[in-house]
Image (cartoon, rainbow, N blue to C red):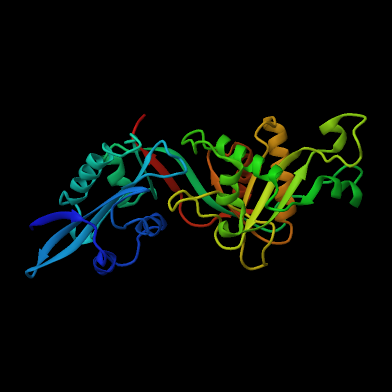
Amino acid sequence: MAIAYREWRDGDDLALLEMWGGPETEQARQFRGTLAPSVNAPWRRCIVAEDVIDGVAIPVAAGVVHEASLHPERLWVYVEVARDHRRTGIGSTLLAMLRHEAAQSPSGVSRLRTKVEPGTPGAAFAEAAGLAPIQRSRLVVVEPGALKLPVFGDGSEAAASEQVEDLATGSVELSDVVGRYYTAVHGWDSPGELSIATVQRLFLDDLSGAHGAIVLRAPKASAFGQGVPASKKGRLQAFAVSYAQGGPDVGGPDAVQGNGPAGTAGKPSDVFLGHEPELSAGDAQAAVRDLLALIAYQYPVLLELDDSMTALRAVVEPLLETGKARLAGAETLVVSDPA
């Protein structure tokens, strides 16, 4: 077997698809979309391995390393080798070549990360390469009526409307809380500085797929104290942003948590559910529980649950244990070079 290595060329995707077949995991499906010619802005390097089969050079493996505008402290890396060419050193050689390229990235960042499914060849390869888990993510469907509906204030419609509100996705108030929450639950892989405009683009505008938001507010008195004008609203405590199709795209492998207020009885709606990060642990859990009870009252809801989302985990994991929620697909591990 005479293996040669070269840069990615147009048409390699079709040739490799013939060798690889369908993606073995959801992570492979996502990462295959990042295989493309090397460029400098945004920085990406992609390498192909060829084998001579019946006198013809055929692509049998490929690998890519690239910068990410979101979570810039690491580079994304992906390597895939045709099944009949695995355990021959091709994957390790590609990874070594990509590490060499990463050492010359213009940002100066060289630490690698990727996503794998536990128990797969990709996970075993990543472990052998020294990449260790830094986060676990699960897709969870919360069934209709899984949580008892909350009672707001005196139980009247007026009290409920004071605390529960449909909010425009263009709201600066919403953008501020969404951005700070996302940063707070991604301390393990910092997203960097998130401006209001960036939060809007990634999570809340039409191109992100966002089509509605519901927020839960604190009662007016507890938020502002006495003597506050009646027009003032309580502080935003929790939010649920629904998406038309699959949640926002934040850079290929950078998947965002989901779940949604709007949906149908058959298909769970995908929504990003979070809370004001300055809330106490107990208040955050209560706010998330109340809002989830509302949006999942009639229709199933799809959430992406990272282990770092402690308030959401505290609400959802008991539902998994009692069968009121279920996993939708396999777990995903984000694995990384050590610090």
In which quarter of the view is residue 246 placed?
bottom right
Residue 241 position in % (x across, y down): 65, 52
For this view, does 261 lie left or right of residue 303? right
Residue found 51% across the figure and 49% down from its top: 138
Q: Which residue extends farthest front?
A: 41
Image quarter of the C terminus: top left
Q: Nearer the viewer, residue 201 or 213?
A: 201
**Residue 300 seen by the camera:** yes
Residue found 31% across the figure and 58% down from its top: 36
Q: Nearer the viewer, residue 110 or 90?
A: 110
Image quarter of the N terminus: bottom left
**Residue 149 seen by the camera:** no
Residue 71 position in % (x across, y down): 45, 40
Image position of 84 with respect to 108: above or below: below
Residue 24 position in % (x across, y down): 35, 60
Question: How many marks do you count on the picture?
Answer: 0
Residue 304 position in % (x across, y down): 55, 50
Residue found 77% across the figure and 37% down from its top: 235
In which quarter of the view is residue 80 placed?
bottom left
For this view, does 238 lie left or right of residue 152? left
Image position of 308 with respect to 301: above or below: above
In which quarter of the view is residue 260 placed?
bottom right
For this view, does 169 lie left or right of residue 97? right
